Amino acid sequence: MKIITREREARGWSRTELGRQARIHPARVGQAENGRVVPYDVELQRLADALAWAGDPAALLEEVDGDVPAV
């Protein structure tokens, strides 16, 4: 599981909702979560902003254990 997925699920958001909040197409969110694409820097920043992520936006794409609680 990627951090972006963990953070999205911790908020109870669908990919559609995260896409809406970040102004990114939901399919693009899914592709990023599944590792099929690496989002552009501007997209990563929008995702980080939508998730109120204080760290490096690129860290959202890192893999984590699914049992690790959201920050």
Image (cartoon, helix red, strand yellow):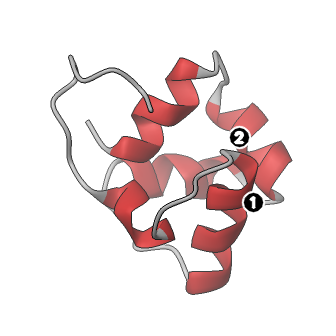
Q: Is residue 8 above or below residue 19?
A: above
49 relative to 57 in the view: left or right: right
Quadrant of the rendering where the C terminus is positioned: top left
x and y, in percent, of residue 6 in the image? 41, 31
- Label 1 sits on residue: 24
How many residues crowd around disc 1 within 10 Å: few (fewer than 14), some, or many (20 or more)? Answer: some
Q: Quadrant of the rendered structure where residue 43 is?
A: bottom right
Q: Residue at x 33, y 20 (%)?
A: 69
The secondary structure type at the circle numbered 1 is loop
Q: Which of the labelled discs sits on residue 18, or is there none? A: 2
Quadrant of the rendering where the N terminus is positioned: top left
| Residue toward you, 69 or 28 | 69
C-alpha gap between disc 1 and disc 2: 8 Å
x and y, in percent, of residue 22 in the image? 77, 55
Q: Is residue 1 above or below residue 19?
A: above
Tags 1 and 2 touching, CB below 8 Å: yes
Q: Residue at x 50, y 34 (%)?
A: 7
Q: Residue furthest bottom?
A: 41
